Image: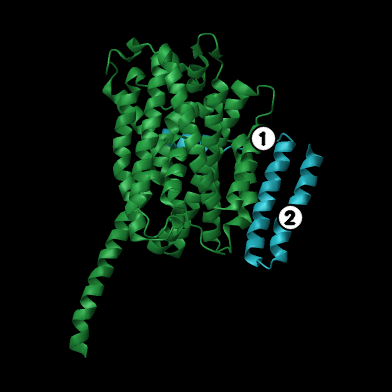
Amino acid sequence: MSKEIIPAGQSISIAVLFITGASLFLGTSSQSGNSSWIAQCLAILLALPLMLVYARLHVLFPGKDLYDMLIEVFGSILGRMLCCLYIWYALHLGALVLRNFGEFSKTVALTATPMLAPMLMIGLLCMWVVHAGIEVLGRSAKFLLLFSLIVIVILQLLSVPKFEYHHLKPLLHTRFNLILADTAGSFTFPFAEIVVFLGAFSAIPAKGSAKRVLVSSTLIAGGIIIMITLRNLLMLGPDILSSLYFPSYVAVSRINIGDFVTRIEGSAAIVFVTALFVKVSLCLYVTCNGVAKVFKLGSYRSVVLQMGLIMIYLSDFIYSNIMEMEEFAYHIYKVYALPFEVVIPVVLWLTAELLARRRNSRHKALPEQQPEGS
Amino acid sequence: MVIYVVFIYALIAVIDPYGLRKKGMKRDFMVCCALYLISFALAFALSMHWEIPSPSPLFVDWVKKLY
C-alpha cells in the first residue's frame, strides 16, 4: 500500500477544525467572566512554544508519527506502553467529543431521540472517512473549513446589531487566579489537544514544514475561538454565558434582522457538526494507527470498524449526565490531559535531542578516526 | 434490540474479521477478533440496558486526590 501524504494546506485545515471542534459547541472555560477572552489570548501564547516542540519532533523524526517516535526513543517495551496511553487518550477524546454532540442533540435539537442515534450516525461517517484514508479526510477538511469560515463570518456580522459593549466592562475586574485557571483550561482544551495530530505526522511530507502547519493553525483557530467568545460575551453577558451549556447556540438564536432573518441557529449547528466530524475522524485515525503500530498490523484499516464502534459505545456510557460532562470538560480535563499534551511530548523531545546530539558527535568523530586507522 | 444487535454483529463478523482471514492477514485477523469481542460485549450490554462502569469517576478521583 502506498504511503498517504497530506499537503500543508490540508493539514492546516484538519488542525484548525480539530482545535475549534468542541469549543464551537461548549465554548471555553469562563470562570473569569468578561475577561475570558484575555485568558484565551494567554492560552494561545502558551500554546505556541508547545507547537514549536511538536514541530521540532517532526524535524528530528521526519516521516515518522508519534508512535514510531516513542518506540524509537524509549525502546520496544516502554515505548509501546506509552503508545497504549496515547491510544487510550485519542479514543477517550473522540468519545468525549461524540458525547458533546450527543448531549447537544439531546438537549437542543432532537430531544425525543435516543442519544446513541445521532452519535452512531456521525460515528459511522467518521469510520467511513478514516477507512477511505487520511488523504480523503484532508480534502474534506479543506472544503469544510472554507464552508465553516464563511458561515462563522456571516453569523459574526449578523450578530453585530445585538452587541452590548458594556458587557466588556470593567476589564480585568475578576481575580487574576481565575484568569489563570481559564488560561490553563483553554490551553489544554482545545489548543494543546493538537498533540493527537502527532499520531498522523507520518502523513506530513518529510520535508514539509510542521512548524508552519501547527503555528498557523493555532493562530487561525485561536482567532476563531476568540471571535466566538467575544460574540457570545457581547450578546449574552458574562453571567448568562457561564450558566449555559451551549452558549454559541443560544447567542446565534438571538440574531434577528428586521424580523426576517431569525432562528438561524440551525446554520450554526452545521458548523458544529463539520468541525466535530473532522475532530472525531482524526481521533479515530490516530487510535487505529496506534493499534496498528503496537500490534505490528499490516494496515490500520483492519481495526477501523471495531475501534469506531468501541468509541461510539464508550461515548454512550462515559458520563451519566450533562453536568458530569461539563464538570469533566472544564475542571478535571485540564489536569488529566496535561501528561499527554505537555509532559510526555517534552520528555520525548528532550530525550530525542540528546540522542540526536550524541549521534552527531559520533558521526563527527568517525571521519577523524578513519584516516588514523587507514 | 438484542436480536438486532446479534444479527448486525453476525453480519459484521462476515465482513470484517472473516474478510481479513480470507486476505491472509493473520495478525490483523487476531487483533480484529479481540476488538470484535470487546465491541460485541459492549453493544450487547448496552442493548440489555446493563450498567457499564464508566472510567470517568476514576479519573475524577485521581485528579481530586492530586488537588
Expressed as whole percent of the image width and height from the top left, the position of residue B19 reads: 72, 60
- Viewer can see residue A320: no
Residue at 18% across / 80% down in the picture? Answer: A368
| Horizontal relation, residue A242 to residue A362: left or right | right
Q: Please count the marks in the image.
A: 2
Residue at 54% across / 64% down in the picture? Answer: A2
Cα distance between the residues tagged 2 and 1: 29 Å
Q: Colour of chain B?
A: cyan
Determine which residue is flagged by label 1.
Answer: B51
- Viewer can see residue B23: yes
Residue A295 versus residue A24: which sits nearer the camera? A24
Q: Colour of chain A?
A: green
Between circles 2 and 1, the one closer to the viewer is 2
Going from N to C along the chain, the mark reached first, 2 or 1, is 2
Expressed as whole percent of the image width and height from the top left, the position of residue A59 reads: 33, 58
Which of the labelled discs sits on residue A370, or is there none? none
Of all residues, the one furthest to the top in this rendering is: A259
Expressed as whole percent of the image width and height from the top left, the position of residue A69 reads: 41, 59
